[in-house]
Amino acid sequence: MLTAFAKSAGLSLLLNGVLWIAASLIGLVPALGESTFFSGVLFASIGATAAAAIVASRFTAAGARKRWAGISLAILLLSFTSPLALGAGNLPISPFNPTDTTYNDFRGGIGIAYAILHFTSYIAVQRFIGRQIPE
């Protein structure tokens, strides 16, 4: 499972890092040196795969992969609520300083980017960690 975690984390870091850089170059999200969002994306990529590896290690019985597939898909779908709420203006951009409006112009772009990053992390987890779970 440790190898699967390392591969998933690496793939998630690569995909999410490249996607965030591309989004910053086209102006969808703040520029890399302008905010701490990029480091937050990288930290969240590792955290998501670590959480998935911890949970996946509990799925050991026969038929566990089918249950894992259903549960992980449900978690992915539920995880889309936060980027959608952020883009719609129902969540503050910074949970640490909710009154900060510095990046309000990027609200929709950040919401879209976060939703895409959730999906790419899901793919990275399924690619390596999901395959470690017994049929």
Image: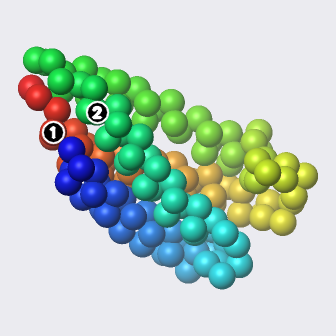
Above or below, 120 against 89 in this view is below
Instruction: Using a 10 Å C-alpha cutoff, classify the residue at mark 1 as few (fewer than 14 neighbours), some (14 to 19) or many (20 or more).
Output: some
Q: Position of residue 75 (x, y in %)?
A: 43, 30
Task: State whether residue 114 is above or below residue 72.
Answer: below
Local packing at callout 2 (Cα closer than 10 Å; few below 14, some 14-19, many 20+) is many
**Residue 56 numbered tag:** 2
Which sits in the foreground, 127 or 52?
A: 52
Q: Is residue 77 left or right of residue 127?
A: right
Residue positioned 15% across, 39% down in the render? 132
Asked if 50 appears above or below 101 in the picture, the reply is above
Q: Is residue 15 visible in the rendered structure shown here?
A: no
Q: Which residue is mark 1?
A: 132
Residues at circles 2 and 1 in contact by the CB criterion of under 8 Å: yes
Residue drawn at x 70%, y 72% as measured from the top left: 35
When asked about the image quadrant of residue 102, the answer is: bottom right
Task: Name the spot of residue 84 as percent of width and height, x first.
Answer: 62, 41
Q: Tell me which amino acid carries mark 1.
A: Gln
